[in-house]
Image: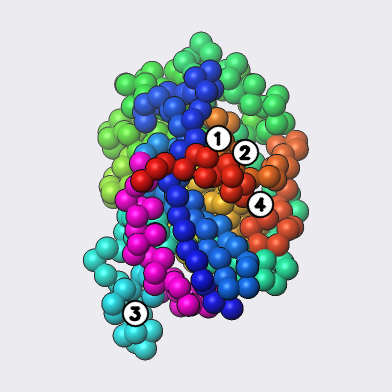
Amino acid sequence: MKIQRVEAWWVRIPIAAANQHRSDFGQIATFDAAILRIESDDGIVGWGEGKNAAGSAGTYGSLVHMLNHEVGPQLIGRDPRDINDIWDTLYNGVRHHSAKLSGHAMPQLSRRGLSIAAISAVDIALWDILGKSLGVPVWRLLGGRKAERMKAYASGGWASADKIGEQLLGYIDKGGFRAVKMRVGAMDGAPHVSAARVKAAREAIGPDIDLMVDAHGTYTVADAKRFARLSEESNLAWFEEPVIGDDKAGMAEVRAASIVPIAAGESETTRFDFRDMAVMKAADVFQPDLAFCGGITEAMRISTIASAFNLRLAPHMWAGAPAFFAGLHVCAASPASFIIEYSLGANPMLHDLVEEKIDLKDGTIAIPDRPGLGVTVSESFLKAHAVKG
C-alpha cells in the first residue's frame, strides 16, 4: 500500500447569526479548520484535521499551503501504515535518518505551531487509513476500548450572571448531561464578575452537577488566584487554562494556591510540553487537542505521561469531525481518560461535515465501532465551503 494523493482545504462554514456566541475570541461567525484527505493506491481514503487556532476562530491559509506544498509531497509513495516513522520523519526533518539511527529526537527549529498542526492532520488521517484497511476501529489498534459509552460534559456557557443558569440548565435538559462547562476570564473583565456568574450557575444547577470553568488562559497569576478563591464555595470540578500556556510556572503557582483542580493543554504541542507540565506540577488534567498536539500518536504518548504521574486525560474536543472522532478513540483506549468534551456552541464542522450522527444519550457518548475513525465525510459539502486560495 502506498500513498498516492494528499489534498488539504481551508474549510470555512458560516454560523447563523442566531446561533453565534461571543467570548474573549470575539463574535464567532464561522467555523474554520484545515481538513486533510489522504488516499492510498488501493483507494482507501483517510481524513485528518489540523488546527492553528483555538475553538473555531482563526485563518488556515498557511497551514493548508504547508500541507499541500511542503508536507504532502513528502508523503507520496510512503506506506501509510508506517505511522510512527512518518511522524518522526516529519518532526525531525532533514535529520530524520540520524534521529532514527540514534534513537532520539533531533527536530528542526520548526518543531511547534504550524509544523505540529500539519503532523496532527497527517497522523489522524493515517490512523483512519490503517483502521479501514484492517476493517477495525482505531481504538482496537490502540489496545481496545475500556467502555462502549463514556461520560460527556456540555461545553459552552457564555451567558451573563442573570442568564447563565438558564443556559446551563438548557444543556442539561438537551442531553442529560451531569457535567457542564462555562467560560470565564477576559470576557468578563474583573475576577469578581466571573465569580458572580459561577455562583449564579451553581445555584441554578444545584450541587450534584459537575461544574467546570475555562478562562482560555486570559488571567494573570494574581487574578487567577483571586478568581479561584472567590469561587471556592462553588465546588468547581476544574479550572481550565487559568493563565497563558507559556507560563507553566505561573500555572503551577495557581494550582498550589487553590483547592480547585487545574486543567490545561489545548495550546500545547507534543509530549515534551506535557512532560514539562507534569514535572512542574502545573496541572491535574491534561487536555491535548488532537488537531494540534501531534495527532492520535502523540495523544497516546501524552496519555502515558498522564498515567505515569497519576494525572487524568480529558482531550480538548471543540473541533471538526475528524479531530473529535479521533479524540473519542483516544478516550476509549487511554487508561487516564474519564470524560469527553461535547461542544454546545454551533458546530457545523462536527455535525454537517460528516454523515454520521454522534450517539449522545443520558450524558454519555457512544464510542464508534465502525472501521477507522468511523466517519464518512461529505466531500461535496466540504468543497462547497472550501476557501478559494
Residue beneath disc 1: 347
Q: Is the residue under label 4 in contact with that under label 1 (CB below 8 Å)?
A: no
Q: Residue at x 70, y 42 (%)?
A: 357
Disc 2 marks which amino acid?
His
Characterize the local packing of mark 1: few (<14), some (14-19) or many (20 or more) Cα atoms within 10 angstroms. many
Q: Percent from the top left, x then y, of residue 334?
A: 60, 61
- When asked about the image quadrant of residue 75, the answer is bottom left
Q: Is residue 272 visible?
A: no
Disc 3 marks which amino acid?
His
Q: Is residue 361 visible?
A: yes
Disc 1 marks which amino acid?
Asn
Query: Which quadrant of the figure contains the N terminus?
Result: bottom right
Q: Residue at x 67, y 71 (%)?
A: 133
Residue beneath disc 3: 96
Disc 4 marks which amino acid?
Thr
Residue beneath disc 4: 376
- In this view, 385 is above or below 120: above
Characterize the local packing of mark 4: few (<14), some (14-19) or many (20 or more) Cα atoms within 10 angstroms. some
Q: Percent from the top left, x then y, of residue 109?
A: 24, 66
As helix, strand or loop, the secondary structure at mark 4 comes to loop
As helix, strand or loop, the secondary structure at mark 1 comes to loop
